Image (cartoon, rainbow, N blue to C red):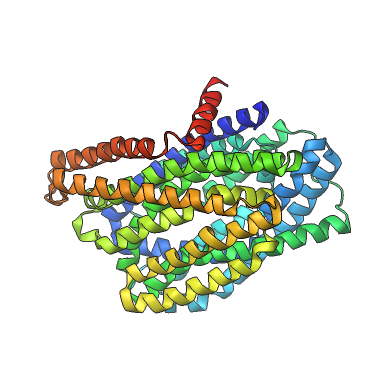
């Protein structure tokens, strides 16, 4: 990777991590205040509405991602005319999407009550008023300058968006906490969402215009460009459908078949997964534009070598994070919201497995997306979405929450571990290195299993869960801190013992030294 790309990636990662820390820690505090002020049922209602609107977000069709991909080449050659034309088309489409989200969302209102198993809503809330506030927030994100985010992303300046997001998150969470503690008004708490979305979109538009004054919405893209863009959009729609089926269908199934209380309990656990996904997502998102630029300018041999290097570093971090999840999940939930809000251990193991199999495909997906192969993998994604929904409905009735998680693990493993890698190596790399890629991941997984097993045994023997469930604060902090220390010491040792003589390890060490020097 060239010096310029390394600098952009490093800058995006630094600001992205800062933004994620703020965007996860502050909402975590808000979530905690909400639970203690109003109860877990309110949290379940929040999760339900978020899941419904995630489904509605399918109407975006992945258009933004396709536009960003289409901008890589014009940016590389300095073709501002094409950049402006793509942005104008993007604005037109996003306004139509915003109106569609609003209209379809309103048409779903008569069916809301059937998605809530509980006969009486918490606090006798007006279900429809709460939903309309959530819907307004979603529609505004498209209608008001939503298209402007494509410019800094395509120019490898995602850090601009990270800084704006940090400021808005601070504002939103501070106001929401004050409202919950002082006013105890759930409706007012919700209204802050669309208000801060308006502020964020307006501020983003102003800053982007100042940084890129030569880029404005004007001109028209050609019919050939529209055809190519639409083809990619169709492929991305299928990918987004799969993503929604992974996350939102889970909460919908639990709410419909088990109830809001368990939905709230599950959402607490998934909140932790989401936080970790956000951190890892910073790395992938920061790399995306640089990898797209590399694919447009470098040969496949160079890009395959980079893929293997980044995959090694990423999976080392993912393995450590998975081990920490396994050992810290239950103590953390017990300290945070109490032992009565804990799910059973099989559900925890399932969530850790889901996190690992999902992350195992991240670096491969960065190259998949950089090569624009969304349309080529459409049948794979359709198959995963169908399998996930069917398995969710079947296993939810048989195994409850654990069944819902297991359904997602199975479908994601088949896609991320087997089918999508085969497609990438066939359609882009066009080499015989697929089995080498699979062998690498088999070794990564064996390393993670060994580390997880040793860490679990040590944690249970030295710092058992009862130290936390007894609710003594000193014991709880000792248990959490001690378990984290065990995982953080043991994971690097095991990883080094297995990998320190490998070519991947030596290349990764050299690359990390280069990153630090820049």
Task: Provide residue 149's location: percent of width, then percent of height.
Answer: 65, 44
Residue 139 placement, left or right of 170:
right
Q: Residue at x 70, y 64 (%)?
A: 234
Res. 237 image quadrant: bottom right
Q: Residue at x 60, y 53 (%)?
A: 141
- 388 lies above or below 473: below
Q: Quadrant of the N terminus?
A: top right
Task: Provide residue 249's location: percent of width, then percent of height.
Answer: 47, 69
Q: Residue at x 43, y 63 (%)?
A: 409
Residue 253 placement, left or right of 422:
left
- 269 lies above or below 317: below
Q: Is residue 394 visible?
A: yes
Q: Quadrant of the C terminus?
A: top right
Of 463 and 205, nearer the camera is 463
Task: Provide residue 447's location: percent of width, then percent of height.
Answer: 37, 46
Q: Residue at x 17, y 50 (%)?
A: 465
Task: Provide residue 303's location: percent of width, then percent of height.
Answer: 66, 41
- 107 lies above or below 171: below
Residue 458 placement, left or right of 53:
left
Of 241 and 311, nearer the camera is 311
Residue 456 placement, left or right of 215:
left
- Give the mark count: 0
């Amino acid at each position: 990777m060239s010096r310029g790309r390394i600098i952009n990636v490093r800058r995006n990662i630094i600001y992205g991590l800062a933004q994620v820390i703020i965007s996860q820690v502050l909402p975590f505090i808000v979530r905690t205040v909400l639970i203690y002020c109003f109860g877990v049922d309110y949290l379940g209602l929040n999760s339900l509405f978020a899941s419904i609107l995630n489904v509605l977000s399918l109407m975006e069709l992945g258009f933004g991602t396709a536009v960003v991909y289409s901008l890589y080449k014009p940016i590389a050659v300095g073709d501002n005319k094409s950049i402006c034309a793509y942005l104008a088309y993007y604005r037109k489409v996003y306004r139509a999407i915003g109106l569609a989200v609003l209209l379809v969302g309103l048409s779903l209102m008569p069916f809301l009550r059937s998605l809530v198993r509980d006969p009486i809503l918490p606090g006798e809330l007006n279900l429809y008023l709460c939903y309309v506030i959530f819907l307004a927030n979603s529609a505004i994100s498209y209608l008001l300058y939503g298209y402007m985010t494509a410019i800094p992303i395509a120019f490898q300046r995602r850090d601009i968006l990270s800084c704006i997001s940090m400021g808005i998150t601070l504002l939103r969470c501070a106001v929401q906490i004050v409202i919950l503690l002082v006013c105890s008004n759930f409706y007012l708490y919700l209204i802050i969402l669309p208000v801060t979305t308006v502020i964020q979109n307006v501020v983003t538009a102003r800053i982007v215009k100042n940084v890129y004054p030569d880029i404005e919405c004007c001109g028209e893209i050609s019919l050939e460009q529209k055809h190519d863009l639409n083809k990619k959009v169709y492929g991305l729609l299928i990918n987004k459908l799969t993503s929604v089926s992974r996350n939102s269908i889970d909460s919908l199934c639990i709410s419909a078949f088990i109830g809001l209380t368990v939905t709230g309990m599950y959402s607490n656990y998934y909140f932790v997964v989401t936080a970790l996904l956000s951190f890892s997502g910073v790395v992938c998102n920061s790399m995306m534009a640089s990898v797209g630029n590399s694919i447009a300018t470098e040969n496949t041999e160079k890009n395959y070598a980079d893929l293997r290097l980044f995959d090694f570093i990423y999976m080392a971090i993912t393995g450590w994070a998975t081990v920490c999840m396994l050992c810290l999940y239950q103590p953390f939930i017990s300290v945070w919201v109490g032992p009565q809000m804990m799910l059973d251990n099989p559900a925890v193991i399932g969530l850790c497995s889901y996190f690992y199999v999902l992350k195992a495909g991240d670096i491969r997906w960065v190259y998949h997306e950089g090569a624009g192969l969304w349309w080529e993998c459409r049948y794979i994604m359709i198959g995963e979405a169908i399998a996930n929904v069917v398995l969710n409905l079947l296993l939810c009735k048989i195994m409850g929450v654990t069944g819902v998680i297991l359904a997602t693990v199975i479908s994601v493993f088949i896609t991320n571990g087997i089918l999508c890698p085969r497609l990438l190596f066939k359609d882009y790399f066009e080499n015989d290195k697929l089995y080498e890629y699979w062998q690498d991941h088999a070794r990564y997984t064996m390393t993670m299993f060994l580390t997880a097993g040793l860490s679990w045994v040590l944690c249970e023997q030295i710092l058992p869960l009862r130290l936390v469930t007894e609710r003594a604060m000193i014991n709880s902090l000792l248990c959490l801190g001690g378990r984290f220390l065990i995982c953080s010491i043991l994971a690097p040792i095991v990883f080094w013992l297995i990998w320190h003589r490998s070519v991947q390890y030596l290349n990764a060490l050299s690359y990390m030294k280069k990153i630090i020097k820049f």
